[in-house]
Amino acid sequence: MAQPLVVKKDDDLDEEEYYSPFLGIEKGAVLQEARVFHDPQLDARRCCQVITKLLYLLNQGDTFTKVEATEVFFATTKLFQSKDAGLRRMVYLMIKELSPSADEVIIVTSSLMKDMNSKTDMYRANAIRVLCRIIDSTLLTQIERYLKQAIVDKNPVVASAALVSGIYLLQIRQNDRLAVSKLVTSLTRGSVRSPLAQCLLIRYTSQVIRESGVSQGGDRPFFDFLESCLRNKAEMVILEAARAITELNGVTSRELTPAITVLQLFLSSSKPVLRFAAVRTLNKVASTHPLAVTNCNIDMESLISDQNRSIATLAITTLLKTGNESSVDRLMKQMTNFMSDIADEFKIVVVEAIRSLCLKFPLKYRSLMNFLSNILREEGGFEYKKAIVDSIIILIRDIPDAKESGLFHLCEFIEDCEFTYLSTQILHFLGNEGPKTSDPSKYIRYIYNRVILENATVRASAVSTLAKFGALVDSLKPRIFVLLRRCLFDGDDEVRDRATLYLKLLGGEATVGETEKDVNEFLFGSLDVPLVNLETSLRNYEPSDVPFDISSVSKETKSQPLAEKKSTGKKPTGPASAVSGPVSTVDASYEKLLSSIPEFADFGKLFKHIYDGHVVLQFNCTNTIPEQLLEQVVVFVDASEAEEFLEVASKPLESLPYDSPGQTFVAFEKPEGVIATGKFSNILKFIVKEVDPSTGEAEDDGVEDEYQLEDLEIVSADYMLKVGVSNFRNAWESMDPESERVDEYGLGVRENLTEAVSAVISILGMQPCEGTEAVPSNSRSHTCLLSGVFIGNVKVLVRLSFGITASKEVAMKLAVRSDDPEISDKIHEIVANG
């Protein structure tokens, strides 16, 4: 409710206060007052006051029920009988605020259209505004003629009302393909003269071309119109047309040529805005069609020294995308002075472009790596330095010859690094890659300096890195022992604990396994459970004589019930709602629950709710009706569409009181070692007994009832756990190459690579690694890395290499490594049958 408005009238009436006229009004009372709208003799002033109160309530957040809104709307329409101008304006406001439904709009349309043709300008202007706000596309054609007349009206109030309303109508019609196509067809014949209108027309034309679904230039509708706009006198129209052509789906080199030509002319323009627009468009084109932009390289090189740093940054990144191997050294020299003149956000863009160029021309890694190391030592913020470090790490991983020099540059950087995150990242990477170099001993000095000079977080990371060198390089182990013993006297307990652990581990006094391989797995292996799940399990762990067991932690990256993932129908509502399907991970509580059921005790090792020779469907049920007790709750499963499954056991729920969760189970036998799939239809059956609310006791007799549940489908992905790895390359190389299986597949026509990548990930049910599930826009090729654990606790790694042609045909190369070569073959079978 509104607070009183306190206003001092004058010095003689200091104690008097004015209150809001709406203080204390209630919706019910105002709705009663609205009955005055039905009076035979309308009191215009009284009606205006009531409408004002209704509008106040609506704007204060009060809501009217459907019945209340309808009654007020019909009552308001009767006020059109009044000739009072003030009341008519209030009626217009009220109708707009009520937003009547389609059925109600028809009733008031005739009155508003009558006002649109009135001799009173105020009536015409307001009627146009109201009518355009409440109608939908079905009534739009009836008022188009009136709007066209109103736009050229002599009265500016009427004309402006028509223009504003036209914008609103445009929002209604812009999704109408036929209407937009007709508009483009009529206007592309040369009737539009305004440059701004032509730019808008070009955008509508691009929309029509995109929606036509034609991906080849010769058959594109209205493409000739876009080309003709490249010869327009207005610069904005030329730029809009060039941008539209370059953004067409599947644009060919022949189609790009005229657009690239005009953009090249703008590169030498005296107007900064034209240079910026041209180089920005060319920069986008260079990502997908670098050869088409190479003719502009000479013009763009002159823009590196442009006073506008945004233009200069776009020019240099475009050159890095389109340059050839012979031009790399020249570009590096030009960028030396350029980098000191731009902000960090532009520097990051340049660094990313240099990284892509180095991967494109790996033989030029020396000059590019030296450039990155030089700018790494210059001043800059965290994001900028992180971009450089990430780029150097990627180059080391992808270009073997760059490892030695790259690691040396990183070691020099951490000598004077002010960012803890980057220091620990580099130390971790150094621990994994340093021992594999020709002379690992040269890195020890840099690592131990961190133990002496840095904060506790970096010191602890340095201790772990030293331990990795000691584990992998036997000749360094005695020196590592000496350094780790010095760390036992560190002031931080984390550093001391790590040093103690690694000394015991490397000295053989502590055991994490039976072989040296187990020690290396402990030091170098990635944590095979998500940190979020581990943290949750540790928080829930209650100290006792039983130690915490990490094997009880869920390994699933994202838990999701199978029925929730696969079902396509609506969520059931009824006496008992059930969520069906195998749970998405091996949770200790589920394993304990299932093992306690005699019928399932001999099924063996549990994986999700799947055993090697059995599948258990668990249905979680909740009674949602207080006055009823459900008994003999059981799910009847029809497996006629799952031929490989045979029902062997069912565990009904004897009693299900109100708001008390319970479970019922159905077990199926399946062939061992086979990835059995199928679809199950489910019917929930139960006996309903009425409960006396006063005593809480149920009646003796009940009524049998049933409820259709959603269908459940078991697919190949349900035999796989999503388990990520922190370093895919190391994990891949640690697996036996003999287990690798490689094959190529055609995925047919896809809209883009993103769709293809998502489809394969969904089929396999594996965890994407290192963000490779994200496909850059307009990318023609992409590599995706996946990790998981197959039933039987078999680790699986997958490399997917995608490529898409101009006709949107997608090809895929699938490489699989696993702990078991037979599982690698099964992964290929899953994809082939998917």
Image: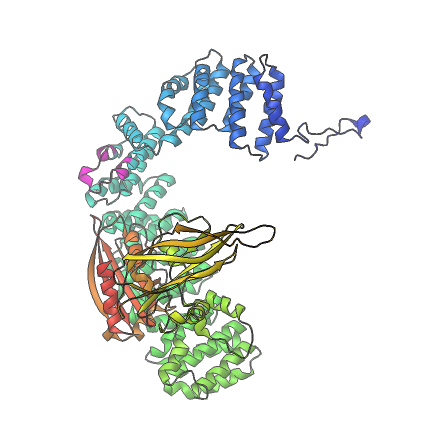
Residue 752 locus on image (x, y percent): 27, 50
Query: How many numbered circles are shown?
Result: 0
Pick the front one: 197 or 186: 186
- 495 left or right of 26? left
Residue 355 painted magenta = no
Identify the image quadrant of residue 673. Answer: bottom left
Pick the front one: 694 or 153: 694
Residue 107 locus on image (x, y percent): 45, 21
Vertical position of residue 441 compared to residue 700: above or below: below
Range covered by the magenta-colored residues: 208-225
- 692 left or right of 133? right
- Looking at the image, the residue that sits furthest to the right is 12
- For the C terminus, the image quarter is bottom left
- For the N terminus, the image quarter is top right
Pick the front one: 52 or 407: 52
Residue 372 locus on image (x, y percent): 37, 63
